[in-house]
Image (tube, helix red, strand yellow):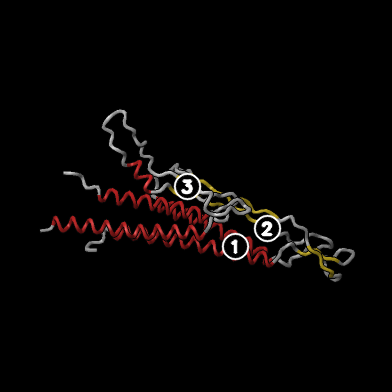
Amino acid sequence: MQPLQLFDTAFQRNEWLAQRQSLISANIANANTPGYKAKDIESFDDVMRKAVPMAVTDPQHLSSGDSAGTARNVNTDEAEVLESGNNVSLEEEFLKSSDVSRNYSMNTQIIKAFSRMLQSATKA
Amino acid sequence: MSDPFVTAANSASHGLFAQSTRMRVLSENIANADTTGKTPGSDPYRRKTISFRDMVDDGDTGDGVDMVGVDKIARDEAPFRTEYMPGHPAADDKGYVKMPNVDMLVELADMREASRAYTANTQVIKQVRELVSMTIDLLRPGS
């Protein structure tokens, strides 16, 4: 039987969202720190593409790197840089934060749906 | 690696601490807005300034979480304003008294900003709590 990857993927997405929330809160905490640059996480699509590599059936096929998990990058193009060198925009961070919340809620609902499906299959 | 939710709440609470320290410095400035020297020609209260720095917590986790900390509390070297009050104990021989270099308007604007940033941090803590309780709700039977 194929292992169930439903829960696995959903929890990975949740973990990614949690990491993102942690970066958002670091950005907000540093909203008044001179020279601080806002950070964001690598998009989930990119992470998935690395974590679920392409099938390689021939040594000459290209492989798609190691699964790096989550990495950080600095966005310099989104918010304007203030005199103090700080480019944190509270509005944008809240936007991202509500995005995380919405996605997290959706994910937990999906996990609940999976578990209901499993239960309906196992219960007589 | 530590739990990202814990680190998120941690960063936010460091933010709260930094902003409340800023609030403390601002209230010291406002409270001393009229504090002059005691002896003739002596310097009055000098305005305090505060700056923050990005504190990377490598600690035992080693994943470099960004915290915020108070960098230093310094003195504002701006010149004092003078007022003509010949009867004042701190008046110099021409009758001028040096007044603190505190500008109430600047302090109040700064205070408003500090309070906004403080609210932003408490909002983050609330949201983290919500996310954690969503996860815990998965374990609730019959949901």
What is the chain identity of the residue bearing mark 2? B
Disc 1: which chain?
B
Q: Which residue is mark 3?
A: B65
- Name the disc covering residue A42, or none: none
Disc 2 or disc 3, which is closer to the eye?
3
- Find numbered disc 3 in the image and state the secondary structure of the residue it sits on: strand
- x, y (%) of residue A22? 44, 52
**Is A37 placed left or right of A17 in the picture?**
right
Which residue matches tag 2?
B48
Q: Is the residue at mark 2 from the same chain as the one at mark 3?
A: yes
Q: Which amino acid, mark 1?
A: Met
What residue is shown at x 34% (from left), y 51% (from top)? A13
Residue A52, position as x, y percentages in the image = 31, 42
Q: Mark 2 vs mark 1: which is more N-terminal?
A: 1
Amino acid carrying mark 2 in the image: Lys
Q: Tell me if mark 3 has few (under 14), some (14-19) or many (20+) residues whose alpha carbon lies within 10 angstroms of its own.
A: many
In the rendered image, residue A38, in percent from the top left (x then y), is placed at 52, 51
Q: Quadrant of residue B62?
A: top left
The Cα–Cα distance between marks 2 and 1, rounded to whole angstroms, is: 12 Å
Mark 2 or mark 3, earlier in chain: 2
Q: Give the chain of mark 3.
A: B
**How many residues crowd around disc 1 within 10 Å: few (fewer than 14), some, or many (20 or more)?**
many
Q: Is residue B96 above or below residue A87?
A: below
Residue drawn at the location 84% of the way across and 70% of the way down: B85
Q: Nearer the viewer, residue A24 or B115?
A: A24
Residue at the farthest left position: A124
State how far apart marks 2 and 3 are (Cα). Answer: 29 Å
